[in-house]
Amino acid sequence: MLEELEIHNLGPIRSALIAPAGGMTAITGETGAGKSMLLSAIRLISGGPSDGGRVSVGAQEAWAQGVFEVASSPAAVAAAREAGFEPEDGELFLSRKVPASGRSRSMLSGRSVPRSVLASVAAELVTIHGQADQLRIATTSRQREFLDRYAGDEVALAAYGKSWSALRAMDERLERLNSQESSMRQQADYLRESIERINRVDPQPGEMDELRARRDRIENAAEIAEGVTRALGALDASQVVDDVESSSAADLIDHASQALRAIHVEGVFSELADRLDSISTDLSDVVFSLSGEVDNEASVEDLDAINGRIHELDELTRRWGPELSDVITWRDKAVYDLEDLDASPEKVEQLEAERAQLLEAAKKAAQAVSKRRRAAAKELASKVTAELDSLAMGTSKLEIRVAEREQLDATGADDIEFLFTPFPGSPQLPMGKSASGGELSRLMLALELVAAEKHVVAGGTVPPMTFIFDEVDAGVGGKAAVELGARLAKLAQSAQVLVVTHLPQVASWADEQYVVAKGETKDGSIATTISQVRGDERVHEIARMLSGSESETSLEHAEELLKSSVLD
């Protein structure tokens, strides 16, 4: 949700700050006042193209920033994290600097980012339905995405995506095999010889460290034996000298413990005896471990064998290392690569059979997606057509055509087309080519309304989004304008809606209203101001929109319009 939009030196707007409502916000003002600059600012922070010619006269650069609450938008958070950003306090700051000459600068939460990153994050937060922006829905890819979101069958889409990826991987593997040349055959020979050499040595994980430890022990056998014997002699002489009468360290500690326990006076003696017992147990373990080392000696022959094995492993690590684990990893990968390089007829035939199975699985998965799309297309088109009747487009009709094809691609096996008929007898044309700017805006409003209602009825939640409508009221008036405002207010129950309008019947439904006005500054220049109107100020603005004046009659009419603009 857009919490705040700040603009500096963009066209006639020297400085402006708006805080849209969580529901519906109306942007009003006389024609030519500069309402379009608000849309320009939002397009900028959404990663749209920049134009230095829109920098205010006399200014060095234009700047716009949007503060978005993203805690309830997992998709936006994921897009930000993918770019290396973590939302702070559940917010993201999208901003853009446009110099009068030179390249613009995009920033996400205060750090410079490529414009594409700004666009990817904004795409999860803002949808602009202006005449230029909504032409994007005319592309088949956008229409398919909208239909898939409406169908809401992520499971079927994910299943197809998995099948498609497996099929593409097999196609790439077969292509490599079928295009194999002499250089690849030489590579296969090299891999085969290398694998055989490594397998002859048969290195084992961790073997090198174990061999070096054994070699160090043998080379220092005398020192180890002397140290172990002296240690055992000090701890328990009976382990190294037969018939010795001296007491071991453990025996002496046991005697000390027993002496303490014989003291029948309260105090620390019992606790100290327990500590001595624990020490005695540890000493016994040490003696046991050391006694096992006395006879653990290796011969010179063992040392020669170990050095020979280490030499063999060193030869492998010099070529495929640096570590023995790298050699084993390289060998295992080489075995797989060799399968691809060894393009024997039997191998190709086996892979072709596997591809046929993968293709059949992908087709079945695509058919499941197609079935869902056809059902969703019929339902969506019917409900949108019904919705158009309340938007002063009662004779218009939307049809969504899903044509299944033989060839698969990453999206499935369907050609999807949104076809719009503006009036009876008109040819059925692709959406975007058969509707005016106002009609297209209202058509998009109908699509968004039906999609939002589908999510709510299904018990789900509408993905949080800020919808911005421009020209949605073009060619509309009277009762149809009231209904248009009501439909925008309905959408605002599940999303944030900003609408640029010149109709009081639309603006009256808004939760908040901002007025864009142009006037002369102290230095004699012309600038645009944006101010929020509430209470009596809003009544006066609605009255101005109704009749161009603020007469007693128009003020009464404005008050009545505001009171009646409430959803049941």
Image (cartoon, grey):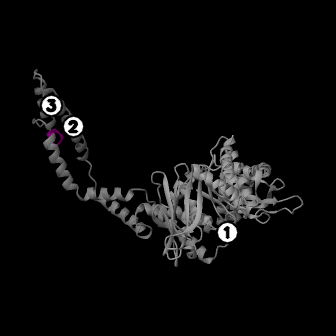
Task: Tell me residue 304's x, y (percent).
Answer: 32, 62
Q: Amino acid at mark 2?
A: Ser
Q: Is residue 38 visible?
A: yes
Q: Considering depth in this image, is 445 or 506 the residue closer to the camera?
A: 506
Q: Residue at x 22, y 57 (%)?
A: 220
Sequence-wise, which precedes: disc 2 or disc 3? 3
For this orientation, the residue located farthest to the top is 264
Q: Residue at x 30, y 56 (%)?
A: 213
The C terminus - image quarter: top right
Q: Which stretch did the figure color magenta?
A: 236-241
Disc 1 target residue:
175
For this orientation, the residue located farthest to the bottom is 101
User: Left of 479 or right of it: where is 321?
Assistant: left
Callout in the foreground (2, 1): 1
Q: Residue at x 76, y 53 (%)?
A: 478
- Label 2 and label 1: CA atoms lie apart by 68 Å
Total of numbered circles in the picture? 3
- Label 1 and label 3: CA atoms lie apart by 78 Å
Report helix, strand or loop for mark 3.
helix
Q: Considering depth in this image, is 238 or 349 the residue closer to the camera?
A: 349
Disc 3 target residue:
272
Disc 2 target residue:
284
